[in-house]
Amino acid sequence: MSALRELGARVWCVATPDIYARFGDQAEVESAVLVSDCTDVEEILCALQREGLSPSDFDAVCSQQEFSLVATALLGAELSPIKPLTAALLRDKYLQKSRIAEADIPVAGCRIHPDLAALDSVSDQLPVVVKPILGASCANTYVARDTQEFGHAIAEFRTSGFNGPFLVEEFVTGAEHHVDGIVRDGELLFLGISRYLQNVIELRSGVLSGSIALRPVLYPSLYEKVSSLARASLAALGHRDGVFHMEVFVHGDEVTFSECAGRVGGGPIDQLVSAHFGVDLHLEWAKTMFGGPGPVTAAPSGEVHGYALLMAAGTGTVRAIPSRAEFLAQDGVVSGRPMVGVGYRVDAPTAASDVHIGEVVVRGATEDDVVKRLHEINEWFRAQVVLG
């Protein structure tokens, strides 16, 4: 919202009461329209009407929230840069991968199983990845390489109460990368590639989750291949205006499409892209909302940058956690912050990538330096966090 205001926009914000209670004092909006569910088109439309408002009263209807993309597209119609069909393709992983496959872009095969009972037939088709069709942040997402991991996934689904429908994907080997960029009028204006420290699916095993931004001058062949795949994928999905957060697998000379979202990447990926590539994804997204000018101005850094999501070492109530100032006092830290405060209850510290309790971006002379520093910051953070 700060990027929209920077361009002179007056902003009305649809939000849930809990989110507005946490961040409303930072929003600087004309008005907040409160709803219980930001994905419910009916509720949002009714709430707007109660405020004497209609979507047609605005110049743009937009969202940077994953779960609100379809509602925004439906409510905004011509006022939304993402149309309903494209929004559905960006949200529904089955529709998305099917469209990508139809465009002859390398992608894992997938199929839908309606419920837990239907998953029984999958046990002889391993390895696979099992996830919700409309999921995000690896929540309720499991890799099953063998019958033991498959049984664990089934048990976790039962414990969580999630009974489907499920998307079952072929397991793809290779190093996972995230690709963050800007597209305007169908033209790819910027693309930055970052390599995950570990494939995101391994998050549940307790590995450090994060990535290293890659300099184009050091990876010209990779940038050429990924740029070609990104252009073809965005065209297939009909995503012509806005930002994107894509994930791909790199195995030797092969690049395989994984997923694509029509928003800025989660965690501190926006800060990573800003520090390493010199591009403000939020500002460029805001420009797109109002038909802003191209091209994108980038100011790449001569250093290497990486980020990490900092998870709690266990469960319990947070009694102490480092402040933003304490993060910035650490060597090599570009940005960092706690994501929760004292009193927050940690119940499942590695359930998904969005349950981290801290995040950090660091810089260094080499990729190895940055990886080492990220692990050091992770150890420092865990030593400072007190759970009771």
Image: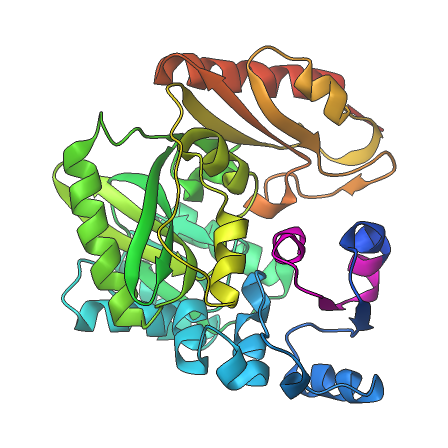
Q: Position of residue 217 (x, y in %)?
A: 22, 27
The quadrant of the rendering that contains the C terminus is top right
Q: Position of residue 15 (x, y in %)?
A: 75, 67
Q: Between 299 and 81, which is closer to the camera in this rendering?
A: 299
Q: Between 256 and 161, which is closer to the camera in this rendering?
A: 256
Which of the 4 image quarters holds residue 182?
bottom left
Q: Position of residue 24 (x, y in %)?
A: 82, 56
What scheme was used to colour the molecule? Answer: rainbow
How many callouts does the rendering have? 0
Q: Is 4 a magenta residue?
A: yes
Q: Is residue 68 left or right of residue 116?
A: right
Which of the 4 image quarters holds residue 254?
top left
Q: Between 323 and 61, which is closer to the camera in this rendering?
A: 61
Q: Indicate whether 320 appears above or below 383.
A: below
The quadrant of the rendering that contains the N terminus is bottom right
Q: Is 75 a magenta residue?
A: no
Q: Indicate whether 156 appears above or below 279.
A: below
Residue at position x 68%, y 72% in the image: 38
Q: Indicate whether 362 appears above or below 139.
A: above
Q: Is residue 257 visible?
A: yes
| Magenta residues, start to end | 1-20
Q: Between 195 and 113, which is closer to the camera in this rendering?
A: 195
Q: Position of residue 20 (x, y in %)?
A: 81, 59
Q: Is residue 34 left or right of residue 133?
A: right
Residue at position x 81%, y 68% in the image: 32
Residue at position x 32%, y 61% in the image: 169
Which of the 4 image quarters holds residue 101?
bottom left
Q: Is residue 111 visible?
A: no
Residue at position x 50%, y 30% in the image: 307
Q: Indicate whether 216 appears above or below 290.
A: above
Q: Is residue 379 left or right of residue 70?
A: right
